[in-house]
Amino acid sequence: MGFFGGVSALAQGFATTFQYAFRKKPTVQYPNIKKQHAPRFHGLHELRRYADGKERCIGCELCSIACPANAITVIGAENAPDDRRSPGERFAARYEIDELRCIFCGLCEEACPTDAIVLTPRFEMADYRRGSFIYSKDRLLVPPEAGVGVAPDERPGGIPADLGSVIEQKSTVDIATGYSATHRGEILKTQRKGLAG
Amino acid sequence: MTLDQVPWWLVVLVKAAIVLFVVLTTFAYSMLFERKIMAWMQLRPGPNRVGPWGLMQPAADAAKMLFKEDLTPSSADPLIYKLAPFISLICAMGAFAVIPFSESSAGIWGVADVNAGILVIFALTSIGVYGISLAGWSSGSKFPLLGSVRSTAQMISYELAMTMSVIGVLILAGTTSLAGIVHAQYKMWYILPQIGGFIIYIITAVAETNRAPFDLVEAETELVGGFHTEYSGLRFGLFFIAEYLNMITVSCIATLLFLGGWNAPFGLTFVPGIVWFVLKAGAFIFMYIWLRTTLPRLRYDRLMNFGWKVLLPLATLNLMVTAAIVAITG
């Protein structure tokens, strides 16, 4: 590369940086605009209910056994005949997930025979104390009136509004094609549909 | 009391205060400007959290600097360590005392109209290097020492070529007064007859102010922070201010020496001279930022090679040709 080659290379470099200054920035202004996650995003857990308001969890502890991070503690108890919490014999008297241990792998979801524990797309769990990352039933169990019997991403309104507005998705994964092709996702979906109701 | 009865020192004081205020505001916003432009060129939005469009960012930065702990390493030489940032800053600020920003019928817009203005500026910026060198020496730490050794070598190498490139202009103008040089460019800016000198000047000016791609003195990828590795809080801030003020100074000098200062181009004299001055100097500052985003840092031996074997001979050649032409044509 001679003198003119060097100068033209320099000019090319300057032209490139100058053009980039006017390009559209890919930055998402996060706290103001939240990008919608893929429907199968593994976020915060949720304990679901049946349509009649009964808890799905039967306290079998399979999730706790499946958990590779030992993050789940379940203590089951017999249902009282006059105050049935779940349709089965037992229910979860205590159900705790340490979200700091959790690796959000979703094995609990797969292990659950009644599809009670599911991962929602919620991811904003930051807090100031370690203790507040241990989620017990009071925070995990969905309220009786919210999204009963349907996994969060299959609810009629789509992803809940508190998870942010949907913004234009460019150069990121196409949610529809990218994820329906996932084998595991497909299986989960059919299983869920079979169990729901 | 008329203006003539105002004591001279009060006039100088008020002028200095105004210039200092304007210059420091310019520093604050040239920093924001740099961060914005750099961010855009790197496909980022840049600072945008403090105030609309990030316009309060300089104030937030200043507040942060003020409240940070002022550390002195136990191995440092405390007196020189504490003095060094002030040497840098005072020299950087001092240069603005002799820079004329514009002109009206009342006289030159500047603190002082010195008849050897360009020499005063070169003297001050040369002393400013002591700030960097002493900071590195007195920090009592390896990386700052390397940075300061580099700064000394770099300054000596590039100051020669820089001065040589400027002498061409001085020969053409026949004066060392900055206002005189601007007046001499009334018909033709010196960028045309002195294009070689101009190119050498802007290259050496980047090296003189330790800006990328010649920021070997800081070189955060090699030397942590270079000469200011050990500095924190306000003292680091002073070095930061000094660096930007030096950048503004060399932009102003380039404007005055080569781009006709406050002379309007194409006879557009209805726009005030100060606007032209600011536009021209601003273009230089933009060029600095553009340079920083585009070019990677030079290797140290190449920097030295470039300075001594390319720039200095070229500057000497430019000076000799200019001198010969002026001598022949009278």
Image: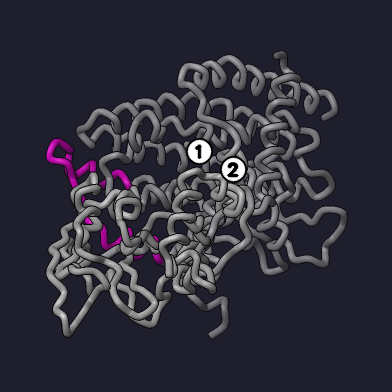
In the foreground, B319 or B299:
B299
Marks 1/2 in contact by CB < 8 Å: the verdict is yes
Instruction: Name the chain under label 1.
Output: B
Q: Residues in magenta? A: B60-86
Residue that appears at 71% across and 44% down: A19
- Give the crowd class for mark 2: few <14, some 14-19, many >=20 residues within 10 Å: many
Image quadrant containing the N terminus of chain A: top right
State the colouring used for the structure image.
Answer: one colour
- Residue type, mark 2 in image: Tyr
Residue that label 2 marks: B288
Q: Which mark is residue B57?
A: none
Q: Position of residue B124 (x, y in %)?
A: 45, 43
Whether residue B51 is visible here, answered yes or no, is yes
Q: Position of residue A66 (x, y in %)?
A: 24, 47
Q: Position of residue B241 (x, y in %)?
A: 42, 52
Residue that appears at 25% across and 73% down: A86
Whether residue B116 is visible here, answered yes or no, is no
By secondary structure, the bulk of the magenta-drawn segment is best described as helix
- Give the crowd class for mark 1: few <14, some 14-19, many >=20 residues within 10 Å: many
Q: Position of residue B22 (x, y in %)?
A: 53, 65
Does A41 appear above or below B308?
below
- Residue type, mark 1 in image: Arg
- Number of labels in the image equals 2
* Element type at mark 2: helix
Which mark is first along the chain, 2 or 1?
1
Residue that label 1 marks: B211
Residue that appears at 80% across and 24% down: B325
In the foreground, B118 or A67:
A67
Image quadrant containing the C terminus of chain A: bottom left
* Element type at mark 1: loop
Magenta stretch holds residue B125: no
